[in-house]
Image: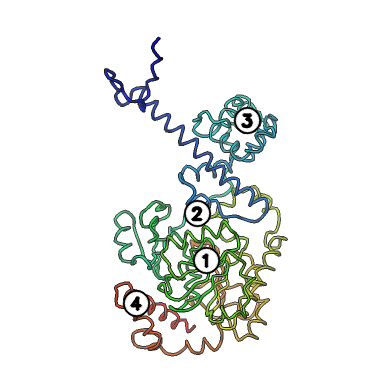
Amino acid sequence: MAPPQPKNRSHVPAKAGQVRPPPGQPGRRMASRDAGERAAFFARREAATVLRRVLRGDASKRSGGSIKSLVFSPSVRNKRATFALVCQTLKCLPILKEVFASTGVLSSKWKKQEELVYVTAYDILFGQEIAVSGSVEQFILLHKDTFRTTLEKICVKRKVSSIKDLISEKTTVKPKPRFVRVNTLKTTTGSVIEVLSKIHKVEKDDMVPDMLVLPPGTDVHKHPLVTDGKVFLQGKASCMVAVALCPKAGWKVIDACAAPGNKTVHLAALMNGEGNIIACELNKDRAKTLQHTVRRSGANNVETVNGDFLDIDSNDPSYAEVRAILLDPSCSGSGTSTERLDHLLPSHSRDDQDDAGSSARIRKLSAFQRKALSHALSFPSVERLVYSTCSIHQAENEDVVNSVLPLATSLGFELATPFPQWRRRGLPVFDGAEHLLRTDPEDDLEGFFIALFVRKAAADESSAEPSKDGALGAKRKRVCTTGNNGLRAFSSLRLSRMDALCSIWRL
């Protein structure tokens, strides 16, 4: 007996005498369906992995990264589908949990794959309804009618007309411009503008060097400029932090809490790849992300350390030449909660019922922040120190700075004013708070806070009048102009801009 003929699928090679179905015929549709099923299968599993990390971080109040940062990490292949699945599953999560609780079908076996069950249930019940022979898919399909009946009962109980009405948008995100930072270690701002202006409207930011502004909603995640590390998707407020520190080429700098590394490699670009940056990150997984960011940027002057900044002995001779420290410690992230999509997290509704600015978590964070800032001030040769957060809470910002001012003063530091043209300053809760800087969603930015400490002796030296070409003295200019290749010449121009910026601020 002849073996049975294979089903007529387009991925099966045509035998002699057979004619492959033309486009639009069943064979072609079957192949397309198979490809869609496979894509959905793998996207659900990537989404479940991200969802697991998001939910565990939310439950423990120790974020392992925002939804966006986890989805757009190198390990996730189908970023667009994964992002959509994670966000939509989170929106439907309370309803899904209620359905599973009512039906009682989620046994201990399936609870071990809880996140994948939720993602698959959303996709089959509310999404594209494509399924393959995965065990979780088969489990959802087996109980699909029961789930739909339960959903209808919930609709009646809630007095809504459809299942869609059960899923309410928790917040409306106001569209913001897409800011991108040109990585001058690899390219020039002019060449990036030339490329991007062919497909987008591009404007230069009027305050942050090498920052470009694209229209809201612009998606350039997969653009070669981004994947090659020539452009970084980084908010303006985040970029203001490194510019405020204003490190000089050749300096030794510490980035105390460095992951994911955008500020680290921005510092490297401002220093023209010269000097040394020690980038510390305690969390092992985030340290890997930091290393990936550094490699993508092409920065050769960054040393990544998987360790605790607080464990560094400030009197160790190895750190005697540290001239600047950027301290952007763990914080509540309240200034970027909308951008981070925190309104989708289960904890969001609970936080709404409490005064988040005075919660136990905020008090714990501010205690750590005070300790880290005091430690940073103790390095003997530090001339400039930036303390920044992406929080809107006074407890993490002005209160932390105010608490260390006596120590800072005793060590010769004073508060300086970065970006003096910026109108939004610190809350007026102590004398000198006008030196502090805040950004706000009202400015089409994330909510950030920046405090700049400058040692008085260093401030006096840098207040010297700039020379005619804008640089601050011949010795620094010689450092800039060593080397003959084109990159070095471009770097010389960049350093003069940073020196001029600092001289304008009188910092």
Q: Secondary structure at mark 2?
A: loop
Q: Secondary structure at mark 4?
A: helix
Dividing the picture into quadrants, the one containing residue 406 is bottom right
Tag 4 residue: 493
For this view, does 450 lie left or right of residue 219? Answer: right
Q: How far is the residue under mark 2 from the one under mark 4? A: 37 Å
Q: How far is the residue under mark 2 from the one under mark 1? A: 36 Å
Tag 3 residue: 151
Residue 483 vertical position relative to residue 54 in the rendered view, above or below: below
Q: How far is the residue under mark 1 from the one under mark 4? A: 28 Å
Task: Give residue 500's position: percent from left, percent from top.
Answer: 40, 81
Q: Amino acid at mark 3?
A: Leu
Q: How far is the residue under mark 1 from the one under mark 3? A: 51 Å
Tag 1 residue: 304
Task: Give residue 494's position: percent from left, percent from top.
Answer: 37, 75
Tag 2 residue: 174
Q: Amino acid at mark 4?
A: Leu
Q: Amino acid at mark 2?
A: Lys
The reply to whether discs 4 and 3 touch (Cβ–Cβ < 8 Å) is no
The reply to whether discs 2 and 1 touch (Cβ–Cβ < 8 Å) is no
